[in-house]
Image (cartoon, rainbow, N blue to C red):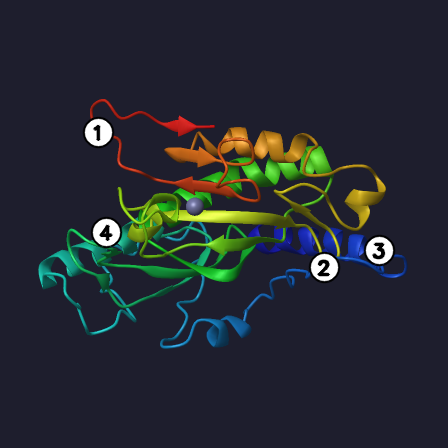
Amino acid sequence: MHARLRTTRLTALAVVVVGLAATDAIASAPIPRAKPDLPSVALAVPNAAIIPRRKPGKPSSAEVPARGWPKSTGAWPKSEVLAARAACERMLSGLDIIWRPDQPIGEPGGCGTPAPIAIAEVAQIRIDPPATVNCAFAQALHGWFSQSVQLLARSRVGASVAGIRNASSYACRRRNNASSGKLSEHARANALDIAAFAFSKKTQITVAGGGTGLLQKTGLSANGNFTTAVRKSACGYFNTVLGPGADRYHGDHFHVDLMKLRPGRFKMCR
Ligand SMILES: [Zn+2]
């Protein structure tokens, strides 16, 4: 079932690529289409082996000891790191994600997170370059991609999304790069900035506006209803969604994060 779906998707993409190859001279840097085993990611994210994708529908591996996590627990209490890793394995169990465990980042109360991972592909959408996030964020991204983004892509664009352009994931900084104020959710590996959605090598929709390849020819662009619908749908999975028009910092990308909602703090979707 899974393999057949993937084959169908790849075939559909191949048709788009072949159809475009002869006529498209101008295109911005494409996101290469994900390969089944994604060997290049090992180069893009050094330091450890990639954990193979777990097939959807496989039984939970919660009892299986964590594999591949670094020995170091960094500046975090060991118990907190081990608990976060176990929670991560449970969260991602059975999800269609290619990910690799990473070293703990930072320390409690500051930048960082105890059990970060690098995600290279989520619900068969390649993350280019791979993003450093926490596991709850990866889980939310999987939900958004698999339940909303791909359905919207097929219904509004007529093709599946093959990759997204990651403009920023983990970064130890304050909100909007200010010199003072609250830490950004990026500083907790709890956010992702998406600059473009790629459908094939030559066809992508940038959040800033404009499509390339087939999308340009057919008049579909970032101003069309795909990005509008995708942005709206993100609010069902994340607690903050910002994009062009929200403020002067988000004119060329979507920012999505899982900011903790405390009493009096509500979702922000602009
Ligand atoms: Zn952001």
Residue 63, horizontal then vertical, whole percent: 22, 57
Residue 2, horizontal then vertical, whole percent: 56, 52
Residue at 35 percent across and 27 percent down: it is 267
Q: Earlier in the sequence, mark 4 or mark 1?
A: 4
The CA span between labels 2 and 4 is: 36 Å
Q: Eyeballing the image, is 102 above or below 109?
A: below
Amino acid on which disc 1 is placed: Arg
Residue 177, horizontal then vertical, whole percent: 38, 49
Task: Classify 10 Å Cα crowding around label 4: few (below 14), some (14-19), many (20 and above).
Answer: some
Between label 3 and label 4, give the one nearer the viewer. Answer: 3
Amino acid on which disc 3 is placed: Leu
Q: Nearer the viewer, residue 174 or 194?
A: 174
Residue at numbered disc 1: 262
The CA span between labels 3 and 4 is: 44 Å
Between label 4 and label 1, give the one nearer the viewer. Answer: 1
| Relative to 239, 97 lies left or right | right
Residue at numbered disc 4: 87
Residue at 23 percent across and 51 percent down: it is 87
The CA span between labels 1 and 2 is: 42 Å
| Residue 39 appears anywhere in the view | no
Amino acid on which disc 2 is placed: Lys
Residue at numbered disc 3: 20
Q: Earlier in the sequence, mark 3 or mark 4?
A: 3
Which secondary structure lies at badge 4?
helix
Residue at numbered disc 2: 201
Task: Classify 10 Å Cα crowding around label 1: few (below 14), some (14-19), many (20 and above).
Answer: few
Q: Earlier in the sequence, mark 2 or mark 3?
A: 3
Splitting the image into 4 quarters, where does residue 47 fall? Answer: bottom left
Cβ atoms under marks 1 and 2 closer than 8 Å: no
The CA span between labels 3 and 1 is: 49 Å
Residue at 67 percent across and 56 percent down: it is 7
Q: For the view shown, which residue lies furthest in the front direction? A: 179
